[in-house]
Amino acid sequence: MRCLFLHGSAETAARLGPLLEEFTHAHVHPGGAWDLLIRWGNRSGGDAEQTVNRLAALDNAADHPQVHRQLALNRLPCRRTRQNEHGEWAVRGVAVAARYRVHVFDLRPVAIVNMGGSRRRPARRRGMYYLARRAVYALGLHFGAVDIAVTPRNRLVILNVEPAPPLSPALARRYARAVKEYIERLRQALEVPPQVRAATVVLGADPEFMLRRRSTGRMRFASDFFPRHGVVAYDITGIRGRNGFRYPVAEVRPAPSPHPAVLINNIRSALRRPRRLAPDRGTEWLAGSMPFRGHPIGGHIHFSQIQLTTDLLHALDTYLAIPDLLVEGSHRSRRRRRRYGYLGEYRLEGHGGFEYRTLSSWITTIHRAQATLSLAKIIAVEYPRLNRRLLIGYEAQRDFYEARKVRFRALMPLLWRDLLATETSREYLDALHTLKTVVDAKRRWREGIDIKARWPLR
């Protein structure tokens, strides 16, 4: 691979240059074609297809008010700071008990550095890394240093994000190791043939739905019908009542498979089982974004036998979450994203895979489920070649969260072209055509209809 590292300062070049000998190091973009470009705060030249910290992301991080506005849009706790005459830092008048700089690269921890206020080791390391990963990703960055304050009440607050942090020799070694690990992940993703990756990557899912009494339109509790464990069970998010907790959300837990068609059959088989438990005629099953006010639901997709990376997460947001937005009802979608389903939402799993959590529940119809899982498979296999990034800027993210679809409808031809140019898409043309037809016609898959009528369950 031809790799170019653009440094922002001579000190950074001196620290990282000897540790990354496989790179060409420069302060000014020399031009030409590069397989990989890494920008350490350097805006020289244009981006390559594979760029770590793109120009648009650096622009986001350069403007401090923009940083705070964009982090707040992504529901991240952030505040501006001030320093009083005694050298004490405060967050909106609240004293800061400790300050830390948290370094992350490609969604992975690099280091936590104590910046003052406490001599103790940070007690909330996991929470700090979680906030730092989300902050870096929300700005469109692959890596950066996130300044986090700890208040006397032990709350974590993001102060700023630095895309080109100064490096000590020890920190330079850690970043160099993170860069090499990233290159190895990228090289493997590019060198493994798509047909081999397609046979390897396994998809799973646990889409949610809720129950409604047909005669009154009132919510029924999933825990009144379904068990805690099983292929269809109630989710553990409960509501406290007079007689203890009750649980309104049901969850489908089919067996995973490398093949979307098999996973669809597994979902259908799973949905057949509980029909005896929930009265067919009197109870409707509802999926989508938010069947009842205050109860957002999701269509989580599980990926295993594949490593989570910033590039894969951006590809899922761009090539899966945007089409999904366009076939949702705007009002319910907007209400849901005020609480749940932010961009790049994921959860690591014990078996080494991860769960993508941005989507609403896509089991409203079997056709929507087929299209969603087919897209997920294509993206997981082909993401190194799906390099368009439409959700880095503030305005695009705002439109996504507010379900403003005009911007994304205009850009969908570019996404279809990218997807159809991949080798893996040939296997899923029917599902893609179904989804494209709905998007092009500006239609949506209705969410207020009993899903039992839209799945062949008999």
Image (cartoon, grey):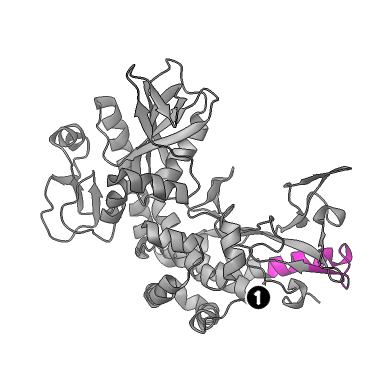
> Which quadrant: the C terminus?
bottom right
Say which residue label 1 marks. Answer: 446
Res 232 → quadrant: bottom right
Residue 339, relative to residue 367: is it above or below? above
Q: Residue at x 35, y 59 (%)?
A: 190
Residue 436, relative to residue 87: is it above or below? below
Which stretch appears magenta?
A: 265-284
Residue 370, how many percent across, how many down? 60, 73
Q: Is residue 313 left or right of residue 374?
A: left
Disc tally is 1
Magenta region, mostly helix, strand or loop?
A: helix
Decide if residue 34 is in sight here.
yes
Residue 113, relative to residue 280: is it above or below? above
Residue 29, how many percent across, how many down? 13, 53
392, 196: nearer the viewer: 392
Residue 367, how many percent across, how many down? 62, 77
101, 228: nearer the viewer: 101
Res 27 → quadrant: top left
297, 378: nearer the viewer: 297
Q: Residue at x 43, y 64 (%)?
A: 318
Does the magenta run of residues contain 272?
A: yes
Q: Is residue 289 left or right of residue 149?
A: right
**What amino acid is found at the position of numbered circle 1 in the picture?**
Arg
Q: Is residue 95 left or right of residue 361?
A: left
Q: Is residue 338 left or right of residue 9?
A: right
Res 208 → quadrant: bottom right
Query: Which type of secondary structure does the marked residue at label 1 adopt?
Result: loop
> Which quadrant: the N terminus?
bottom left
Residue 9, how many percent across, how many down? 15, 38
Decide if residue 181 is in sight here.
no
Does the magenta run of residues contain 240?
A: no
